[in-house]
Image: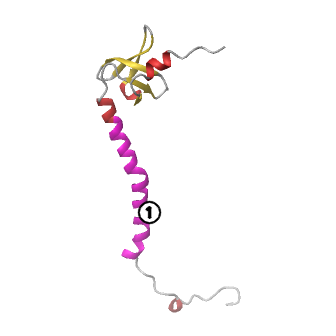
């Protein structure tokens, strides 16, 4: 009957090795690389964005996450009022401000000549 079924020879099987410190090196290295490539840069960006939001004052030119360029008219705890055109103001969430623009960007965008 051993022709169809292989004999189970327990004494021929190699001894099972217990995972030690050597078996954990590769998973720990993968976690370290993941942490360095993804977690640290994301935390740095969050800190920079928080500083940017705290530095908002009246008169600063900003761009929102939706791409709207405007000048800050009023700053509240949760909202920012932007002037996007002459006598046109919009209210956006403070967290929607993506970046600060150099002084004069808003004025230069208003003066662009119309092309036909």
Q: Which residues are magenta?
A: 20-49
Find the residue positioned furthest to the right: 3
Indicate left or right for 50 with 87 as reference: left
Q: Main secondary structure of the magenta part?
A: helix
Residue 98 x/y as whole percent: 42, 31
Which residue is identified by label 1? 30
- Picture quadrant where residue 99 is located: top left
Q: Secondary structure at mark 1?
A: helix
Looking at the picture, how far across and down is residue 34, in whole percent?
A: 43, 56
| Residue in the image at 39% along x and 19% along y | 71
Q: Nearer the viewer, residue 112 or 81?
A: 112
Q: Residue at x 59, y 14 (%)?
A: 114
Of residues 93 and 86, the one drawn nearer to the viewer in this rendering: 86
Q: Quadrant of the C terminus?
A: top right
* Residue located at (57% from left, 87% from top): 8
- Residue 94 position within the rendered picture, expressed as x and y whole percent measured from the top left: 36, 25
Instruction: Judge whether 64 appears above or below 26 on screen.
Output: above
Compared to 79, does 53 lie above or below? below
* Magenta-drawn stretch contains 92: no
The correct choice, above or below, for 15 with respect to 33 in the image is below
The reply, left or right, for residue 101 in relation to residue 55 is: right
């Amino acid at each position: 009957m051993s022709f169809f079924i292989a004999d189970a020879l327990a004494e021929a099987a190699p001894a099972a090795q217990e995972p030690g410190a050597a078996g954990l090196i590769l998973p720990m290295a993968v976690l370290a690389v993941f942490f360095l490539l993804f977690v640290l840069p994301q935390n740095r960006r969050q800190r920079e964005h928080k500083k940017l939001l705290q530095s908002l004052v009246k008169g600063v030119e900003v761009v929102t996450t939706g791409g709207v360029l405007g000048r800050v008219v009023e700053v509240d705890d949760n909202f920012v009022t932007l002037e996007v055109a002459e006598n046109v103001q919009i209210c956006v969430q403070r967290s929607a401000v993506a970046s600060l623009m150099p002084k004069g960007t808003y004025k230069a965008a208003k003066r662009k000549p119309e092309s036909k």
